[in-house]
Image (cartoon, grey):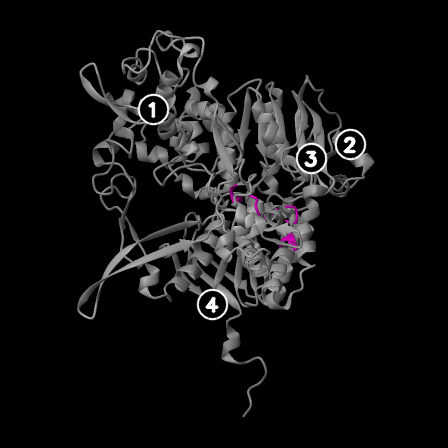
Amino acid sequence: MAEAPGTHIADSHEQIRVVGARENNLKNVSVDIPKRRLTVFTGVSGSGKSSLVFGTIANESQRLINETYPTFVQQFMGQLSRPEVDALENVSPAIIVDQERMGANSRSTVGTATDAQAMLRILFSRLGQPHVGSPQAFSFNIPSVSGAGAVTFEKGGKTVKERRSFEITGGMCPRCEGIGEASDIDLDELFDREKSLNEGALTIPGYNVDGWMVKGFTESGFIDPDKPIKDYSEQELQDFLYKEPTKVKIQAINMTYEGLIPKLTKSMMQKDRDSLQPHIRAFVDRAVKFTACPDCGGSRLNEGARSSKIKGVNIADAAAMQITDLAEWLATIDDAEVGPLMASLRATIDSFVDIGLGYLSLDRSSGTLSGGEAQRTKMIRHLGSALTDISYVFDEPTAGLHPHDIQRMNALLKLLRDKGNTVLVVEHKPEVIEIADHIVDLGPGAGRAGGEIQYQGDVAGLRASGTITGRHLDDRAKVKESTRTAKGALEIRGATQHNLKNVDVDIPLGILTVVTGVAGSGKSSLIHGNVPAFDDVVVVDQAPIKGSRRSSPATYTGILDAIRAAFAKANGVKPGLFSANSEGACPACKGLGVIITTLGFTQTVETLCELCNGSGFSDEVLEYTLDGKNIAEVLAMSAAEASEFITKGPAHTTLVRMIDVGLGYITLGQALNTLSGGERQRLKLAISMAKKGAIYVLDEPTTGLHLADVDNMLGMLDRLVAAGNSVIVIEHHQAVMAHADWIIDIGPGAGHDGGTIVFEGTPADLIARGDTLTAQHLKAYVGA
C-alpha cells in the first residue's frame, strides 16, 4: 500500500530542537527553530543571543562534524567543547560567517583569502606572455631559489653518491620579500646630531646618559663620547650605527657591542607593534617610515612575474584593479583552454560585486578590512555553492553597511534561504528583522537578567508582543530642532589615502560630527588616515582587545587594582593576595577556576575546580572580606552592582562610565575573550572618557546595540560634547545621523566612484536637499 504524501519518517525533522540550553547566561532554554527558513535572533546586548546561536547550535554542529574525521586529522583541528545543553536534535552542518577580523598577516590579501589570487596565478601561467613558469612563479609568497650538492643513499646494498640540483621559480620580490613595503629609519628621530653621547644625544626611550644602554657605546672604544655626532668620521659613524656584533670589555665585564640600528631593530622594530609599551610604540611610529618597495612599486612581485602579460595587463595590474574593473577585463578573455577556470574566477569576482565589495582590490591587505567587510568577504565562498540543507549562521551581517547596502544584504540572505538552507541571523537592525520568517527574542535584560525566551513567531506578533524589542521596533529618532555651534575646526587638506580624491574638509570642533556614506566611500580613509595625526585625539575602534581568559574587565580597566588595595587595607595584608593570577591563586587550578584536561585528538575537558568552587582563589584569601563580601563575590558582581558597592574614587567613576556606555550587565571577572566587538569598543570608550577637551573618534559605536540602547548611546555622546570634547563618529545608523550637529557625507558611490565630499551641513539641510543616497534614506527614516 502506498504511503500518504508527506508522511515519510524522513520528513519529520523539519525543526532544530534545542532542549535545556544553559551556555553562559541561558536559563534552561528550550526552543524549536524551523529549518530552511530565515530566523532572526533579537534581544538587548548580553541577553544570550550569541550563547544560543553560536555557543550552542553552531558549536555543537561543528563539533559533531569534526568527530567524523580520522583521529589523525582531528589532532590538528581546534578542539571544541560540548555545550551545556540537555539535547540538540536535527542539527544540520553549520557554516559560521562571523565578524572576527581577518588576521593582519602582512602576506594575506583579499585575493589570497578568497582564492581569487590563486586562480589568477593559474590564468597567467597558462596565457601570460612571455611564459615565465608555473603558477608559483606568480606568487609573492614563494621566493626564487636554486641549489646543488651531492646526496648519498643506499641502493642495492651499495652506498651511492650522486650530484643533484634544484631550482624553484617563485614570484616574490627579493628586496621586500613579498611584503610590498620597505622600512626606512629616520636617523633624526634617534639622536640630536649637534650633541655628543655624553651630552645626551640619544633620544630613544630608555637610552639615558648614565644607563647601560648608552655606556655600551661611550665605553666601547669605537667612538669618542665627547664628540658631537655631526663631527664623526665615516668609520666612527659606521661603527656607531651598523657595526656587526663584536666582543668588548666594559668596566671589566665582557659584553657584545652592536651598532645602534641592528640593536634597535631587534629590541623594538621587529616586535609586534601592539605588544610594545605605549611610549615605545609612539617612538617606533615616529622613527620608522614605511614606503612602497622601490624595486616592485609595492606590488610584492619580482620582475619576471611582472613581465608576463595578458592583453597588456600583468598580474600585479590585475590585482590592483578595483574589482568592478577587473570583472570587465576578465569578460574580454575567452580562450577555450582556460574555460572552466574562467567560469570559477568570474563567479568569485561577480560575488564580490553582488555583495557590495566591488570597490575593493585583490591586493588589499586583509588586515585592513573592517569587521563588516571581513564578514562579507567570508560570505563570498558560499554564494555560488551548490550545497543545500546547510545552516548559515551570521553575526550582525549589516555591521558597517549603509542603509542603501542593507537592502542588498537582505536579498543575499533570502537567496541563501531560497536555495534550501537554514539561515540563522543575530541582528538588531529593524530592516533585517522585517524580512524574517521566524523570530526568537531573548531577554528580558542583559547578563544575569537575560537568558530567557521572550517571544517566538513572526514580525507582526513581535510588534504586538510587548517585549522590549517589540516596543522599540518602530522607534524613529527625530532631527534636532537646534544644533550646537562649532568652536573652531580641524583642517584636513589634500587627503589622498586609498580612494580619496584630494579632499579638503574642515571638521568642526566642540560638537557632534557624523561622517557617513556608503560602504567603501572613503570614510575610514579620511578620518583614521588624517585625524589621529593631531594631538589629544582618542581613537576608539572595534579592534580586538588583546587578552587571555585570565584578563577581565576588572583587570583591563584598572578597577581590580583599586579593589585589591581596598581589600589589603581593610585586612592588613598584601594586595598581591587578591589576584587569581598571583599569590592568591587556588593551588589546584592556578587561578583559572576550572581544571583543564587535554585528551589529545578528542575534545578538551573543563571541569569546575572543586577546591575553590570556580572562584580561582585559595581558601585563605576568601576568608578576607570587605564590607561583608570576599574578593570572589565582588568579581562576580555586574558593573551596575559594583557601582553601588564601590561608591567613591576613580574605580567608581569608571564603573559609572561602563553603565553609561551600556555595559552595566558585564561582570567584573568575566573573561575578556567572551566580549563581542561592540562590547569591546564600548569598554575602550568607558576607559577613554576621562579626558576633557579631547577629540574622540568613534567607529560605529552602535554596533551590537539593541534599539533600546541606542538612545543611551546618543545621551552619552551628548554628555561627552557637553564636557567640552569634540566627537567625530563614523556611523551608518540613521538615529545617530539625525542626532548629529553636523554631517559630512562622502560618496557618491564606493571605490573610485567615491572619495569626494558630497555634503557638509546639518541633518535638516541634508534632508532638505535630498540628493544623496544618505539623504534619501535619512528622509525616509525620519518620515520627512
Was residue 225 drawn as part of the magenta stretch in this picture?
Answer: no
Q: Quadrant of the C terminus?
A: top right
Picture coordinates of residue 577 (x, y %)? 25, 28
Q: Which residue is mark 1?
A: 243
Q: Residues within 10 Å of mark 3 (few under 14, many from 20)?
A: many
Q: Nearer the viewer, mark 4 or mark 1?
A: 1
Above or below — where is 499 with respect to 55?
above
Q: Dot 2 corresponds to which residue? A: 764
Q: Which segment is the magenta one? A: 352-367
On the image, numbered disc 3 is attached to which residue? 737
| Horizontal relation, residue 725 to residue 148: left or right | right
**SS at mark 2 in the image:** helix
Q: Is residue 448 left or right of residue 75?
A: right
Q: Secondary structure at mark 3?
A: helix
Question: To which quarter of the image does residue 252 belong?
Answer: top left
Q: Is residue 89 above or below residue 681?
A: below
x and y percent of residue 429 in the render?
63, 47
